[in-house]
Amino acid sequence: MSQNVLVTGGAGYIGSHACKVLAQAGYIPVTLDNLVYGHANAVRFGPFVQADVLDRAALDRVFAEYNPGVVMHFAAFTYVGESVTDPGRYYRNNAVGTLTLLEAMRDHGCARLVFSSSCAVYGLPQILPLAEDHPLAPMNPYGVSKAMSEHMIADFGQAHGLKSVCLRYFNAAGADPEGGLGEDHDPETHLIPLAVEAALGQRPPLQVFGSDYPTPDGTAVRDYVHVLDLAQAHLAALRFLESDGEAGGKSTAFNLGLGQGFSVAEVLAAVEAVSGRAVPHTLAPRRPGDPPRLVAEATLAERVLGWRPEFTDLREILRTAWDWHAGARDRVGP
């Protein structure tokens, strides 16, 4: 019998790709999403419950009906700037939402969790590349809410035997090469979709924040990882939690990235190479708090989870994003 996996935020960008990977692996993803930022037409791989993780009664009904053996928790607000101007919204949704989910899991006997965390828990890097033992010093309420959630998850592990994997993403990018699923946020703040849509003439010229960083071309450097590789990492984490043996199921955190950084200028050049179109852009001052470089040390995930990104070429990642956005009139997904 296929196992049910509760996927909170499964109608969102990364969550919907994870649902597809789960279904392909023989699991039944049960999506719970309030559709504040998710898209109902992205839920095509299992049952859908429109509800909020803050709604304990709804969680009780979902656990009673579907009896999931594992939870994948993606549901969160993710706009860093908004978290600074409205921190209460982020602490309530991200931190209290996680607590509500953890209490429901405890009460319904579900003891395995894969948590969608973020490299924002690290704050300004002291050492690069960033490894999992780097101090957690988040610089904004979004990052704090993710770090708080990780701490709560660890405490529930100590107190109630919860087994967990916290996956700290760097920059998710790309789209499902088979079509249907891609990146569509409102508002959009991520570099790659902004650059692609600027090249398509679907939005004004892109703003490049900072051209005087201590990097080879003066623009900020980030580590980009394909969304399907992130989804595969969640599947690997689930199987790790299900495994037996000395190392199997031991709660831990893993970075997810390529371990290689690309500058903003390199991303724009790659979009132009893939599309054959210029990316209209203007230069703007640095944004406060933006570090010059953020690059993952991701070998622990390879060593323990057996996870290795399949999309390792920036142009290959960008090609999937370009194809999805360029075909936006005909797409089926979010």
Image (tube, rainbow, N blue to C red):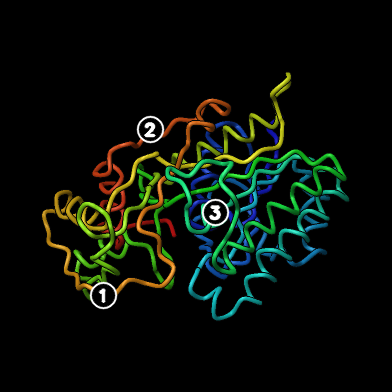
- Residue 287 at x, y = what percent? 37, 72
- Residue bearing mark 1: 284
Q: For the residue marked with disc 2, what is the amino acid? A: Glu
56 w.r.t. 6: above or below: below
- Residue 50 at x, y = what percent? 65, 63
The reply to whether the C-beta atoms of the residues labelled 3 and 1 are less than 8 Å apart is no
Residue 122's mark? 3
Q: Residues within 10 Å of mark 3 (few under 14, many from 20)?
A: many
- Residue 282 at x, y = what percent? 19, 73
For residue 110, side relative to residue 205 (left or right): right
* Nearer the observer, 151 or 175: 151
- Residue bearing mark 2: 310
Who's the residue at 74% across and 49% down the image?
153
Label 3, secondary structure: give it. Answer: loop
Label 1, secondary structure: give it. Answer: strand
Dot placed on the residue nearer the N-terminal end, 3 or 1: 3
